[in-house]
Amino acid sequence: AGPLGRRFATPAALAEAVAARVTAGRVLAVARGRAEFGPRALGGRSLLASPRTRASRDRVNALKGREAWRPVAPIVLEGAEVWFEDLVPSPHMILTFRGTPRAQREIEGVLHEDGTARVQTVGPRDDAFLRSLLERLEARGEPPVVINTSLNRPGEPIVNTAAEALAAAEAMDVDGIALGDWLVDRRPWSGEDAAPG
C-alpha cells in the first residue's frame, strides 16, 4: 500500500478486495475499462454498495447529492431467480423484474417501492471483475448482488477519464475507488486483501 493505493494483478484479486469493503458497508466508486456509452452505469463507471438495507441505498443517494427516493439498480449473476422472478439475461439494465420474497427480506436496498428493480445480469462471458465480485460476495456469505448507480455528481455526465473519476470520488466523499487495476482507500482499511500483483 502507498499514497496511490494498491495494485492488483488480476480482476479476481481486485474483486476480492472490493467484496471485503462492500461487505463491511463501504461505498466504492469504480472506474475500469473504456468509458461506457449510453444512459446506464454498467459497472465500469459506477458506485457500488451492499444491497442489504435501504440505509445503504440512502447513503449512496446522499453521497451523490440526489433525492432519497431515487432508485438504484442491482447487478446480479445471470440465472439469479432466487432474487428476481422470471429473470432473463439483461446485461444492459433495460428490463425490470419483480423481487422475490427472499429479495424483499435480504436485498431491500435495490428494490423500488413497488418491489421491482431494473436489473443488470452478469453472464459467463461478461466482465470478469463484476462476475468475480459477485462470486466473492457469495463466498463471504453475502447476497451475490450489489447496488449500482452511475459515477457522477448532480447535473454532470457519467465520468470518462481517470482524473474525472478521482475528482468525483473526492467530491462525493466515497470510501474508496477501484481505478483500473488499483484500489485507493480514502479511509483507513484494516481488513485483509488478496495478495497484490
Image (tube, rainbow, N blue to C red):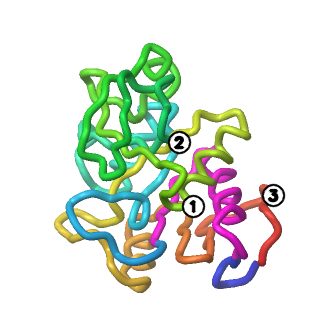
The structure residue drawn at horizontal position 64% and vertical position 59%, both measured from the top left corner, is: 15
Quarter location, residue 169? bottom left
Number of the front mark, 3 or 1: 1
Dot 2 falls on a residue whose secondary structure is loop
Q: What residue would you read off at disc 1?
A: 128
Q: What residue would you read off at disc 2?
A: 50
Tag shown at residue 179: none
Q: In the image, is residue 9 part of the stretch drawn in magenta?
A: yes
Quarter location, residue 13? bottom right
Q: Residues within 10 Å of mark 2 (few under 14, many from 20)?
A: many
Residue 152 pos. (x, y %): 30, 66
Residue 98 pos. (x, y %): 32, 23
Amino acid type of the residue that numbered disc 1 sits on in the rendered structure: Ala
Amino acid type of the residue that numbered disc 2 sits on in the rendered structure: Ser
Residue 6 pos. (x, y %): 70, 77
Q: What residue would you read off at disc 3?
A: 192
Dot 3 falls on a residue whose secondary structure is loop
Dot 1 falls on a residue whose secondary structure is helix
Q: In the image, is residue 175 part of the stretch drawn in magenta?
A: no
